[in-house]
Image: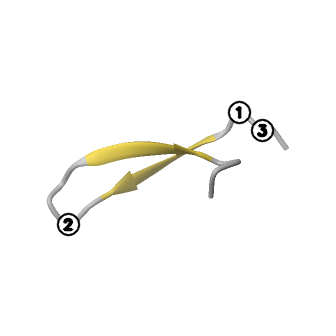
Amino acid sequence: MSSEKLITLKTSDGEEFKLDESIV
């Protein structure tokens, strides 16, 4: 698995932000 994989999350406000998989 790639440690550089990013997870894109969408908030209820429709905002998008990415978290590093290693953080979550």
Q: Which mark is residue 13?
A: none
Residue type at tag 1: Glu
The residue tagged with tag 1: helix, strand or loop? Answer: loop
The residue tagged with tag 3: helix, strand or loop? Answer: loop
Question: Gap between marks 3 and 1, in whole Å?
Answer: 4 Å
Of 20 and 14, which appears nearest the observer? 20
> Sequence order check: which comes first, mark 3 or mark 2?
3
Residue lying farthest to the left in this orientation: 13
Describe residue 20's horizontal placement relative to residue 16 as left or right: right
Give coordinates of residue 5: x percent, y percent.
67, 39
Classify the position of the C terminus by image quarter: bottom right
Q: Which mark is residue 4?
A: 1
Question: Gap between marks 2 and 1, in whole Å?
Answer: 26 Å
Q: Which mark is residue 12?
A: 2
Task: Name the image quarter holding residue 1.
Answer: top right
Give coordinates of residue 3: x percent, y percent.
77, 38
Q: Residue at x 14, y 60 (%)?
A: 13
Which residue position holds label 3?
A: 3
Q: Are marks 3 and 1 in contact (CB under 8 Å)?
A: yes
Of 19 and 7, which appears nearest the observer? 19
Residue type at tag 3: Ser
